[in-house]
Amino acid sequence: MSAAPVENRESAAAEPTSQQLDPAGAVANRVVTSVIAIGAFIFALVETVTAARELSHPIVAIFALAALGGSSAVVIIASTPSRAPFSSRALALAAVLGIASIVLSAASVMGTNTLIRNDWGGVSFGLVLLACGPYRPARQVAAIGVFGAVVIGFVIILQVHGFTADAPPMAFVIRAVTPLLALCFASVAFTRVTVRSIALWQSRAKAASALLTDEASPGIARSIQQDRVTILGRDVIPFLREMASRDQVTDDDRAQARAIANSIRSVMVAEADRSWLESVVESSASSASGPGGGGKAVVLDKRHLAGGMSTEQRTAIRTLIVALIEAAEFDAGDLRIELTEVGERSVGVIDAKLQSYDYLRRLALAPYFAIMRAVFTNVVIDFTSSALTVRFSYDK
């Protein structure tokens, strides 16, 4: 079984979303999103049943509920971790179905609607937009909410002649659009505050990380120097001491000197070429609680493409690697990671051999896959009972 490719992640340069800045938080928010979306449909259903005597076209009312149900279903499905990120296409589809439900609901009571107290369109569609808040830019949600309010206002103007209450038409319009605008802009305000808070926290975290790096640099340099001194003390100094105790240099001495020099050079080159990804894999395998240290994972990154990943992308890769290696039956030797260049993009493939990949394992790894989908593009996950392959790409 394999997952379908996910569409390219949309640029967050214009206006980031909570899901893009905090993928793990978006996964946790999905329960609330589903409850709100389902609540929107239940509210509409209850209001329709309680005002059944005002329905002039019951069949149209059923279609109105079906459209709203479709809008709620789109939000629930699009917000699932396996389909991250929540696309603008999904938001547009949810909006079209939601606005269609408003129009159909009004048509179902056309000529018999005496008061707007049972008109559920504004509240239900507002709840749908509220559920979309963490996944789409605030500007998009606000624009759709305003457009929905215009549609509701137009529908109310068409019905105002049948209302029994004596009030100016604009009063009915304001009464009808207020729930939608209130819920919509509540979602917008919450989203913007959340995005700003996450962005501020991330900027502070990056500044603190840079400060810690500067502070740790002297210690790292001393550690590297000490490693070099250890190599010299173990291999070079005893050889030189032995040479000094003799009067001549033999061919064997020259051969041994070349071997020591090549050994030291190879170690230094290997350490200089090692990327952060190789360090993560090595440290995770060595500290694994299971048999993760029994083998050695393979990391192929000849062009040092791992260095082009953003902080969020590195975090996503790191957490997935640790989750795989920490599994009780997983051996680090069953892990292979390869990064290559394809045109202007970097493409990564993670291959892991699994002893078992049942429903529980898939459920346990689902949050890590969700984060991968939120920060990388073209994420494809293929899995069988004995193997897992994760393909992804990102800008260089």
Image: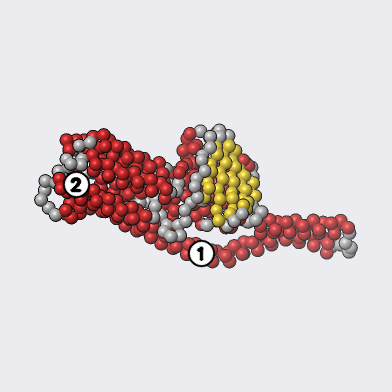
Q: Where is residue 13 in the image (x, y as percent from the top left)?
A: 45, 60
- Inspect the image, locate mark 1, and give the three-letter code of the amino acid beneath it: Ala
> Residue at image x 50%, y 37%?
361
- Within 10 Å of disc 2 (Cα), the crowding (few <14, some 14-19, many 20+) is many
Say if residue 293 shows up in the picture: no
User: In the image, 191: left or right of 24?
Assistant: left
User: In the image, 271: left or right of 45?
Assistant: right
| Image height of 349 relative to 271, above or below | above
Q: Residue 210 carries which label?
A: 1
Q: Where is residue 379 in the image (x, y as percent from the top left)?
A: 52, 46
For label 2, the residue is 159
- Inspect the image, locate mark 2, and give the three-letter code of the amino acid beneath it: Gln
Front position in the image: 198 or 293? 198
Q: Position of residue 368 (x, y in %)?
A: 49, 45
- Within 10 Å of disc 1 (Cα), the crowding (few <14, some 14-19, many 20+) is few
Front position in the image: 3 or 89? 89
> Residue at image x 47%, y 64%?
207
Which secondary structure lies at badge 1?
helix
> Residue at image x 20%, y 37%?
56
Front position in the image: 100 or 349? 100
Front position in the image: 133 or 353? 133
